[in-house]
Structure formats: C-alpha cells, structure tokens
Amino acid sequence: MLKRVFAALSLITFTCGVAAADDIALAHRRDNAEADAVEIISMRSALAKEFIKPGAEVNEETFKKVCGEVGKKVKEISEREGVVIRHSAVKSRNPKNSATPEEAVLMERFEKEKKLKGIDEEAFFDGKKYFRVTRPIYVEKACLACHGDKDSRPLFIKEKYPEDRAYGFKTGDLRGLISILIPLD
C-alpha cells in the first residue's frame, strides 16, 4: 500500500515538475518573442527614418531597403526561434497581411485602449494552438510617404498593389499589428 501511495505521489510530483518546467520554458519564449517584436518594430522605424527623407522619391529600391530588410529579419527570427510572425492590418496593402477577424478585434482593442502596449494570449491560427505575443505598429512621419494620401503613393506601389487599402493614415495612427506565434502543440 505504501509503495502505491509513494508511486502516486512521485507521479504527481513529476507531473507538476514537468508542468512547471513547461511554464518556465514558455515564459522564456514569450520574453524572447516580446524582444523580437520590439526589434522588428524598431528596425522598421529606424530604416524608414534613414531612407525616407522629406521630399525624397520613394521607389522600389527604397522599399527594399526598408520593408525588404525587415522581411529578411522576420524570416531569420522565424527560422531561429521556430515561431510564426505575422504583420497584419485591417487596411492592408498585401492581401496576405489582411487581418483575420480575431486580429481585427485586437486592433479595435488597441484603438480603444491607447496606453495598451501589448496583448499576450493563447490563440489558434491555421488550425494550430499558439501563444501569441502581439504589439501595435503606429504610423510615423516617414511612413506617410507610402501610407499617407492615396494619390501621393509611389507609382510602383499603385502598380504592384492594385487592391491597396494601406493609405490615408496620419502620424500616430494605428497602422497594424505584429504578432509572434509560439507553437503550443
């Protein structure tokens, strides 16, 4: 009888230990995801300020130096960390970045709660369970070269993205979200 009680207690202790270790591992990955989101947002901001000067022509080369480099960083982080990284917006330029209904709700929340810095929660995406770290992306002055007035958008954007809805923003507006999805399954 004592052996059974000891075995049951050992199993409970082991199970709790595994759960605690899983919680610690998830907390560590969450912290990494938050740092990665900040890095991506900061990188986009710094590159836009560096390459998009007032009055300068924004062309495909400029686009590659800003958005292209950010895309490379996203791919690098995704592969290194084993996460899915999404840029999403209700007013998207690239259809693959269109907000899901759930992401649209998150954007509404960021719009209503202006001081909210992030939302961390469990979520499903493409039928899989994740822990999602979501941070808002706000429009800065340099962003207006491509996301300001509809008629002022660079010609290559108008041609490459005929269904573009990512314009009409003002400095300080919520542009979209960056979400880093940590697999839980």
Image (cartoon, helix red, strand yellow):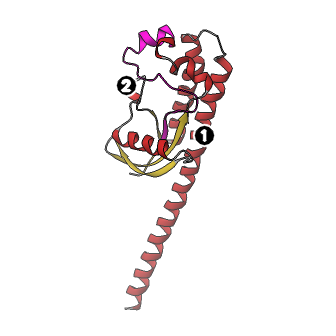
Residue 55 in the image: above or below residue 121: above
Q: Which residue is mark 2?
A: 95
Helix, strand or loop for disc 2: helix
Farthest residue in the bottom direction? 1
Image quadrant assignment for residue 94: top left
Residue stretch in magenta? 153-180
Q: Amino acid at mark 2?
A: Pro
Helix, strand or loop for disc 1: helix
| Residue 173: % across, % down | 53, 32
Left or right of 182? Residue 138 is right
Residue 41 in the image: above or below residue 94: below
| Residue 101: % across, % down | 34, 40
Give the quadrant of the N terminus.
Answer: bottom left
Q: Nearer the viewer, residue 98 or 180?
A: 98
| Residue 142: % across, % down | 61, 22
Q: Which residue is mark 1?
A: 38
Q: Amino acid at mark 1?
A: Val
